[in-house]
């Protein structure tokens, strides 16, 4: 394993790209060698983010300008469809981490890509055995991360039923990226809340497929309603789910006390997760509450969508691949308030 | 029926009180005769709301200063428990409209109070028959209004099942009133979202009791999780519910096309309700979506919590009682943005 | 003077247009006959604002579809440059009220247009004498309204000097209209504040020209820095200005006590104007404070930019022209919170 | 100079305290040994900030429980007046950094305290000469930091006049601390802007005194108007000031190109500073613009009030005192968006 590695970022000027640049500034083992941009090459990243005026980052370059042997890992922070278009041009020996949805379903089915839900990576790949092989990691969706992080162990260990899972998620607007459309304007987003793509969001099939993989052919039925709320960062998912027969919340709490996850944490029994507790961190905090409907529990789960839901989880995946400390460059207190 | 009536407001300086004062300024049949305040009598309402500096409102007075024969209707905008304490001192011939939770459960059981869910008032009282009798109206809770307004006709007409109703509500912070506590500070509320009183909010029993009244002894099981979001006004409720056997969404849409409600409106099939569409109005907008889980539908419902969820519905109840036009003083375009 | 008049709105789907539609719903003397839209004709206004779903408004039509004899007054709510392009096609006998900047400078110089700073309209036109003539009113800019409303009487009556006026204004983002550009996105506007067009905003020349008209050839030097703050509505202007020799704040307060303005109001000496006190109203509230620099005073002035700074002032101008009550359809309590 | 030092924080649960704890987590030379709290001792910091649930911080202790020889530096993050009350009980050999206003004026006059405007510390103390002596550093006010950081070199080097300085500052609400009072509630702060303590804020005398120290007995006249805007973090100050005779903006730009300051940075000539460019950083970004009034310039300056205006500057002062790298633990990219 190398002591230090070099990284390239493709799609540097979006909200995910700029967050990845920020987070890597805390990482002791990685240097950003290339910032690649399809439309903005030749310019500087500080032309788009004046806050980086006095930092030393490489200029934005074209994809074709990259000298591939200089880099080890490439992060793809591209709009939907763009990763698929460019993937064949990236040398096979690189570690590729794709933050888009382009290969997610593939990663949950065929196995060429690894589904990078990092706190549960052991279920998807053994990096000790796969050390030399090419590694292509598909970062989960931000909603999916907030939902599957607590759900996977519950399903894997038969604590819950999979046939009537109702998920109501609330996300900050950065989840929609930096698109200049009316619905993302301050005047439209502020002072409101808006459900969208009800029962048809693309993360829904990702969530269902992943749950299916862990549930041994049991019936999987998922309802998923995302809402945009007037904040920049953060997702809170409220999951209404049935306990498996004979199980109770105490069983689940015991499980999480015995099994440690690096960034996935259950709170104390009286604590309600809120977005402000995880902003600026790579944590997924969750807690479980008895529902008033018999047999049902309520799981509340929170993440920072730009970190745990995107750039941070990508780094965590890189750490796992290169056997750096899992929390290298990711061990933050929340930014509050 | 009198041409004009006189009103008193008890608890004038809170967010509900000030909204009631504002809304009554649009009403052609009511004059505000008394603004009553326990702790602030002697002052002017503009001492608390400088925006009212150049308006002519009566000074704040003590309860004991009211000359009762001068007024017809009294609105109680008091903190929990205060209405119960004072109710016996209000003359019986007055129309009393209580905006607190003090008599809500009573209004759903004993019958001395009327449960004032105004668009469905006919189920609770016939004002033609009760014209001369004393009228005590208990305004529903703001969450309950957003939820029960679309649900009552669905349950009454057997479109849905009552045994597995999951409700995820999101409310602006004014629902918490004007209390100076840490959790209501700008620094704590902004940039976050926070569930609270999970499965134990007091509106839950109100909702369950009301549903029970309409469901003919069927099993009623309700899950209710309220969340605070960083906005001032508005509630959006996402209701996950099962269709009754043999029913579908089209049946429901047909029903609402044939049955008109003054302020309760179903949107066109492709429209998703958002809070910004009802801010500043007395409307409850909702729509119904097919869920991915077979047999389930998703109802999205929105109100302005200070209007339809409080002061506006109180006025609507008054209009019904006095047989004014039901939308007198309440017919607004939304304030946008 | 007619009892009722008919209006057309050109540019109905922008933030100013929709606010004008809302405000006119409170006006007893005007009916909206036409909603005109260059690009959206054939659709309904509720296609853009679902909050208007259940209101009866005329369909959007093309300019060429208007039957001119049916209307009395036309409001132009168009982007910069569009009013100039279309003005020659509007029949001369109509009362035209232009809310853009296209004719503002003209209205301060040539006299064919009236500069519609409504609380001071008497300085610009005598509607009693001009009753029958054609009337073209140019609505002042929103910043200019917040600044000139308190300044005009101070300058006209020689209370202040005009040679060193420093104005620092803060505006909600609706001032930028409904443009889908990066800088108007929620992610960019929220949690920040941004000065722009420092010393070169187009309202600056409007302000200077107007001040010059009232200052008898004295030196006029104005510094003007607008800032965008993360709110939707409202402008607060902080004006740093020198008292004229021998004058003091008391003189000024005396003046405003003796001279009444319908919507321009000085607060009590200890009250500091805030935006929330005027949101939803046509008021301009201001107050005057002794500065620490000798001879200087600080004027703080607030308006709702969409009402007093746009649609409300347009209606006030119409009221003046048609000799309706000046506050007809404009007498609101603030919407709070 | 020691390789590592131990720190105590007095007043750990306020917004400044929690930010100091967060920032010190990035510092390689300091360990937090004590978190001291007058009213909350015995509890854990994570009882107040659940985001710190899984971090290892010492329990909150009483002041009297501190074993003083174990610590090198103490940070006082206390409400006004509390530092003065406790100062005599802190051993003299400690480095004391006070973040309150208690000793600021003293630090600008008597010399027992050092005025800790860190980018200009050389003007206040030579840490090489004062190495062994006791060090008491008074951190400047947050407003004062945003204003004096760019002004001190301009005044010291005679680029500007001091007799007519008009400062209009806009601050996030965290500047008011974590006080549960009506005016800090979300409902009151959101959707508004509010000037306060016009011409009488306590930072005004601090600013004036500091300017006087650098201006050789010239007349010093400062106007200062702070405003609260609906954001959590950040201050933007707009400074209207006169150039000294014979000076121009180019002279000033040349000066800043030749003289480097660690965290104080002038932007390129066409760039306008915004708060979002410095949030999460210890930077003070500023720029200078030609005003329309002849002889005047406009300086726009931005900081993160909790970092450069409080906890970050305190750490920078500590770095200077202990001759750590000046930006040790403080070299951040902005958190955006």
Image (cartoon, coloured by chain):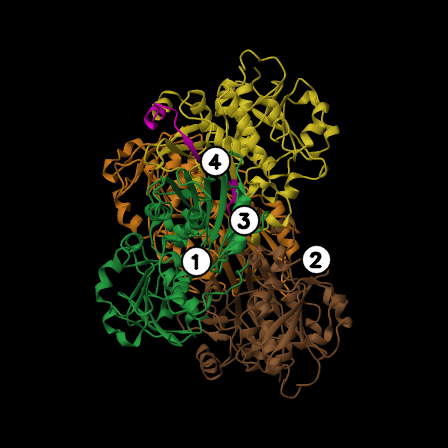
Chain colours: A green, B yellow, C orange, D brown
Q: Where is residue B200 in the image (x, y as percent from the top left)?
A: 58, 37
The nearer-to-camera label among 2 and 3 is: 3
- The residue singled out by tag 4 in the image is B167
Q: Mark 4 — on which chain does it sit? A: B
Q: Residue A119 carries which label?
A: 1
Q: Which of marks 3 and 1 is nearer the N terminus?
A: 1
Q: Mark 1 — on which chain does it sit? A: A
- The residue singled out by tag 2 in the image is D40
Q: Position of residue A59 (x, y in %)?
A: 33, 74
Q: Mark 3 — on which chain does it sit? A: A
Instruction: Report whether mark 2 lies on the same chain as mark 3.
Output: no
Image height check: is A310 above or below B95?
below
Q: Which mark is residue D224?
A: none
Instruction: Specify start and end residues of the magenta stretch as a single range.
Output: B226-252
x 32%, y 57%: residue: A100
Tell which of B119 and D299 is nearer to you.
B119
Image height check: is C56 above or below C213?
above
Q: Residue A253 carries which label?
A: 3
């Amino acid at each position: 394993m190398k002591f230090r590695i070099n990284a390239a970022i493709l799609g540097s000027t979006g909200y995910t790209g700029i967050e990845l640049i920020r987070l890597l500034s805390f990482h002791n083992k990685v240097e950003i060698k290339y910032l690649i941009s399809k439309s903005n090459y030749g310019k500087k990243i500080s032309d788009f983010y004046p806050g980086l005026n006095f930092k030393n980052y490489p200029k934005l370059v074209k994809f074709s300008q990259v000298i591939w042997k200089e880099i080890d890992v490439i992060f793809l922070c591209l709009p939907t469809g763009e990763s698929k278009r460019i993937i064949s041009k990236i040398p096979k020996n690189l570690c590729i981490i794709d933050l888009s949805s382009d290969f997610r379903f593939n990663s949950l089915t065929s196995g060429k890509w690894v589904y990078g839900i990092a706190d549960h990576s052991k279920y998807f790949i053994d990096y000790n055995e796969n050390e030399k092989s090419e590694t292509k990691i598909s970062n989960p969706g931000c909603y999916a991360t907030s939902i599957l992080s607590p759900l996977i162990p519950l399903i894997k260990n038969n604590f819950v039923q999979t046939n009537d899972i109702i998920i109501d998620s609330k996300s900050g607007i950065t989840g929609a990226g930096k698109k200049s459309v009316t619905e993302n304007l301050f005047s439209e987003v502020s002072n409101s809340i808006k459900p969208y793509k009800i029962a048809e969001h693309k993360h829904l099939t990702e969530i269902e497929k992943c749950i299916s993989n862990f549930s041994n052919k049991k019936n999987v039925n998922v309802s998923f309603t995302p809402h945009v709320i007037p904040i920049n960062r953060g997702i809170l998912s409220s999951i209404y789910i049935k306990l498996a027969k004979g199980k109770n919340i105490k069983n689940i709490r015991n499980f999480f006390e015995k099994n440690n996850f690096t960034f996935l944490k259950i709170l104390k029994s009286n604590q309600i997760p809120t977005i402000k507790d995880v902003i600026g961190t790579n944590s997924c905090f969750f807690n479980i509450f008895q529902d008033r409907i018999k047999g049902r529990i309520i799981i509340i789960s929170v993440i920072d969508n730009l970190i745990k839901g995107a750039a941070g989880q990508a780094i965590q995946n890189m750490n796992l691949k290169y056997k750096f400390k899992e929390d290298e460059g990711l061990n933050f207190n929340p930014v509050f308030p």
